[in-house]
Structures are given as structure tokens and as C-alpha cells.
Amino acid sequence: MALSKEIFIETYIEEAQEYINAFTEGLVTLKNNPDKQETVTEILRNLHTLKGSSRMMDFVQIESLVHGLEDIFKGIRENVYEFTDRILKLSFITTDRIKKLFEKIKNTHSDEENIKPFTDALTRASRGLFFDIESLDALNKNNYTTYADYEDQDDSTDIENLTSVRIPISRINSIIRSFDDLLIRQFRFKHQLERFEKKLAETSALSLPKQLKEDLLLTENSIFETQHALLDLRMLPLNIILEPLKLSFETEAAKQSKKIIFDIPQTNFSMDKIILEKLKEILLHLLRNSIDHGIENEKERLAAGKSPEGKIFIYENQISNHIIITVGDDGRGIDYKKIRERALSLYPQQKNEISTMNEKQLQQYLFMPGFTTKDTSSEISGRGIGLDIVRNNMERIKGKIQILSEEKKGTQFKLTIPLSLATQQGLFVQSGSMKFMIPSHYIHEIADGENQNFIISQGQNYACIHNQFIPIYHLSSLLGTEKSDKDNAIIVLEYLDTQIAVAVRSIEQYENVVVTALPQIMKKMDSLQGVVYDENYSIIPILNIPNIMQRMKGLLAYDMKKFNARNKKKIWTILIADDSNTTRQIEQTIFETDGFTVKTAGDGIEAIEIMKTYHIDIFIIDINMPRMDGNTLLNNIRRSDEYKNTPVIIVTGAYDKKAEDSFLQAGAQAYILKSQFERGMLLKTVRELLSER
């Protein structure tokens, strides 16, 4: 899909005008007070932001002019030279040229123009050399904005033609905070009124006037409608960051000489500005990761049987009030061997634990500060930043991240993000005498504590849920709430593919509610992320699950991974070799239903190939098979050092005493007729043989 930057031009120009105005205001301030370093810092910040947005939009001329101004003020900040009237005049002339380019962009969507005289003068000025301001003056005669012009300019506007006004986000946030206070007062007023009505009913025959109740209800509805309308003012289209990112990374891919197709379709989703600010940085890093780590060079891709062009994509879909953003590529996938090696080199004290980790468990190291598998740094990635920036920003916007990767096929990062931080879905739970809310996207499942198996090992409690041992904690023990012996509800929480179980007194209702910032007195409580109001208008804290899980992990008295490895139910692997497809399917269904892993082969040769690839715990083989029969297969099994003692069961269609004796003498442990075949008998025989191992 061709990049359509035109839809962002109006937004870009409005924002760029703001930065240029702030820059010129800074020039005036600096002229009046040349020693004010914070003014220079603010000027550089505005220039840097304008340069970045111009680069995103591919407006090269504006980017070059702003970059030239930036170099000059860096020299002033570092006291290489002073801020003179000539530099002031050059700054205003350059600013005027940039504004003219804004007008050109409005009309042509391009900033193409010969700006060499300006960039030459800016370069000389940034080096402390003489620059010809008079020539630029002649070029821009009667066009550039002088200092006097700036002071006396007329900002009058045709008010009748105004169709919109610009409101700073800070002002919207301030109004929302004031509205939160109004909401709290409204809750308290309604609660007090309900108590008053109850007392009236108890002490007299009087009741509140019907009109008062109706007015109160209408006021409440109006307040909620107004609140949602206010929150919507902060919502911005997701495209506002997706389109510029695509443009930026097409440039980065070209620098690395990688042919990449970026599949980033336009979307109609809008999100809270606060979320978009963090999401931009998250996507920036994930796309860099895909370009630098994921996509192979053309030679590697062709050797792997892939198309010469790599593919990087971003897809979105919405589930309830969350948006699921998938960022992926069709590159080399995650090299878990390298991750293990790198983790062992960085954390040698965890050698035993790291050596036994599976791929999901190894993923946690990708999110640790400074972790990278790159041997060298590139311009856009591999600087040891790792994915910890992604993790931190996802936690700030109350999001969740998962990694799906397949070697040589690619990697996907699945981001679950709320559309707004102003609302939250979750469960209200009771812990002791206190009530809390748990955000829904961290809840893996809910279990009944009365019907669960529990064990204690090395001082740590574990719940056995679906044959998996999960460390369990009483929420009250961590939060310091009143302890209860009636914690009969269990909630399994999941974050970064790690699970813990939390016991609470009760689970109440599932709600979608408006979030309010933490009161000042609770600001330093890291285990909370905000507050909401329940149906009784009581303030209910929202639990910060990533923080709580980290703290609970620190409470572990025993290494859970080792415990699971020792106590996990053994999953046996069976190889069925039979030329009858029906027999194979029946036997496979029986064993898989009972929890076994099953491999099947149509004859002895195919069975031997499977033996080389997988470890087999027991063989079930037919006698008569094409290419290699059961007798020859059994001899091959017994000649193998690995399988010379592995149990073998012969399943045959016809009884032959001589054949039975021959197979038993050759090392088979059992001989079963298909005509006498029973599910229970076969399972019992297999279990008995495996129990002896």
C-alpha cells in the first residue's frame, strides 16, 4: 500500500507552526537576556522536535534548515560563540523561509526548493565563521520577518471564519481533574441523600420528593455523559503515529540495504493521547528490532527459500475496550540458543536454572535492561537497550505483551492496550475487610479454592491447577490488609508468561468503570495504579499487577522452576508402527486421550527414522508390515544402545504360538491379539511396563 502522508499535512503544519512560534519567542527572550541558558535549552528542544517531525514527513528542506539552526544554538549553548544580532537576523530570515515552505506544502504537498544559500550560511555560522547575511537579505528582500516586525505584528484574525479552536492538552487534563473532583462530590452527595432517605423511612412517613429524585438521576446521567465527552477530547487517531513510522523505517531499511515490504494498513481506531505517546516509542523499538534482528539480508532469505523481500507488518483489532496490536515480521525468528548463551554469560549464578528453561521462560531475558544478542551495534538497534523500554512503557499504559516466534519463520509481538486510561474493566475482589479491583487483562482464570489441591514445599504454598503447580499467595499478606481464614477464591494472574495464584476472600462483580488518579496520600503506593468507585460510591483501589507479581516473586522461598521440573507429571512418548491406518488411529486416540504423546509409522523403516528424531519410551509394533516387518524392527531396536531396554509390545492380527515365543525371546515384553483388543487391557499393559522404568 502506498504511503499517504497527505492526511497528516494539516496536523504537521499546525504543530510545526507552534514550534516555530515558540522558537521565535525564544529568540526575543534570548535577545533581552543572552545569558539565560534555560532559554537556549528550550530553543533546542523545540528545534529538535520540529526536525524529527519533518523527517517523519520526509520534508527534507525544512529538516535541513532546522538542523542548521540547531547546530548554531548548540554552539551558543556550549559557549563556542555568542548570540549576536547577525545570528538573530539569520534566525529570523531562516524562520521566514521555513514559513514559506509551509505554504508551499499546503498547496503542493512538497517542500522542494533550492535552499543552498541558507544552508551554506547556517553551516558557516555554526562553525563560528563569517556568513553573508546581506546576500540572504537580498534574496528575501521585503519578505523576511525582522525583529521589529515580530514585535509589532498584527495577530488579528477573521473571527467569523473560525470553525474550530485549539485547546492545549494540558488544559483538557486540568478540566478532567476538576471534573473528577466534581464526580467525587456528586457521589458523596448521592450517598448522603440515600442515607437521609433511609433515616426518613425509619423515623417517619416522610420521603424525598419524587421530583428531587428525578432531578438527581438526570444530573447523574448528565455528569457521566459530560465526563465521557471530555475524555474523548484526548482521543487521537492511531494513524497519526503509524503513517510517519512507516515512512521513517522505509528509510532505515534502505540504509541497511534490506528489501522490506511494510504492511501497515490505515485504521479507524482512536486512542488516548497519553497512550499514543508511549505507544509510538513502543512501536518504534519493535520495528527497529524487526529490521535489525528479524529480517535477514537478501542472500540469507534466498538460501532459506524465502522471497528476497522481507515483510514487516502491524495489524490491529479491537476486543471490548482494548485494542490488540500485532507487530511482526517473516524473518529469522528468535534464536533461543543465543538467548540462553547470552543469559548464561550475563547471569552465571543462574546457570542451573537457565540451562533447564524452555523457550517461553527464556523470553523474560529479552525484557531485561542491557540484554541483546547482537555482537555489534547498528545505527538503529543493538545498543544494549533491549526490550526493557517496551516492557516499561507497556506497564505505564496498563498494557500486556506476548511473544510468538518460530525459528526461520518470524516473530510477532502481541500488544494488548486499553483504548483509554480513563476507563478500566476488571473484577472487584474482597481481601479481608477491604475491596480491590484487578484489571481484566491480567486475569488468566478463576478457580474454586475449596476444590483445589494444595501442597507446601520449602515453606512455599502451591496450588495444583490443571496438573500445573503455581505459587499461591494470600493477597492480604502482601498488601497488609486484615488476614482471613476464608480466602476460598483463587485468581490466576499472568504477566510476561509468568503465572501466580492469588487467594482472596471473595470475588464480587465484573465492571467497566471510570478510573481516577490516585489521591496524593496514596501516590507512593507502587502496588496501586489508580482508584475507581463501586456501586456504593466507595473508593476502590486498582491493583498494579506487574508490581505485585514482581514483589511476590521476591517472596519465593523456593525455586519454582526446579520444583515444577521435579514434580511435573511425566509425559511418555509411544511409537506405534502398523501398516493399518485404522489401527494406528484407534491406538493413537486411546493413548492421546490418556495424556500420552504418540508418534505413528506405516512400517519399520519409517519407525527407525522417527526413533532418530524423537526419544521413544515404549514401542507398539505390528508383525506384518511392508519394507521392514516387525521382527526386523525389533532386532534394530534391541541393537540400539539407546533402546535396548525400551519396552516393546507386539500387536498382531493372528495368534501364532511360535511367533509369540520368538518375539518374547527377541526381547518383546508383551504379545496382544487385535481380535482380543480392549482399551483397558492395552492401557494397563503399557502402564505396567512403564512403571517398571
Image: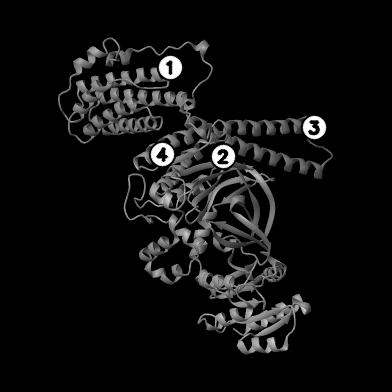
Residue at x-position 18% and y-position 19%:
132
* Kind of residue indicated by mark 3: Lys
Q: Which of the marked residues, 2 or 1, is nearer the chain's N terminus?
A: 1
Q: Position of residue 168 (x, y in %)?
A: 47, 28
| Left or right position of 437 against 126 | right
| Left or right position of 310 against 541 | left
Q: Position of residue 63 (x, y in %)?
A: 33, 29
Q: Which residue is mark 2?
A: 420
* Kind of residue indicated by mark 4: Phe
Q: Which residue is mark 1?
A: 107
Q: Position of residue 90 (x, y in %)?
A: 24, 21
Q: Label 3, label 2: how many angstroms apart (C-alpha)?
A: 37 Å
Determine which quarter of the picture holds residue 645.
bottom right
**Does the CB distance between marks 1 and 4 fall below 8 Å?**
no
Circle 3 or circle 4, nearest the eye: 4
The numbered mark at residue 212 is none
Q: Which of the marked residues, 1 or 4, is nearer the chain's N terminus?
A: 1
Q: Position of residue 468 (x, y in %)?
A: 61, 68
Q: Label 1, label 3: how many angstroms apart (C-alpha)?
A: 61 Å
Q: Residues within 10 Å of mark 2 (few under 14, many from 20)?
A: many
Residue at x-position 71% and y-position 79%:
652
- Which quarter of the figure is the C terminus placed in? bottom right
Circle 2 or circle 4, nearest the eye: 4
Helix, strand or loop at mark 2:
loop
Q: Which residue is mark 4?
A: 249
The numbered mark at residue 210 is 3
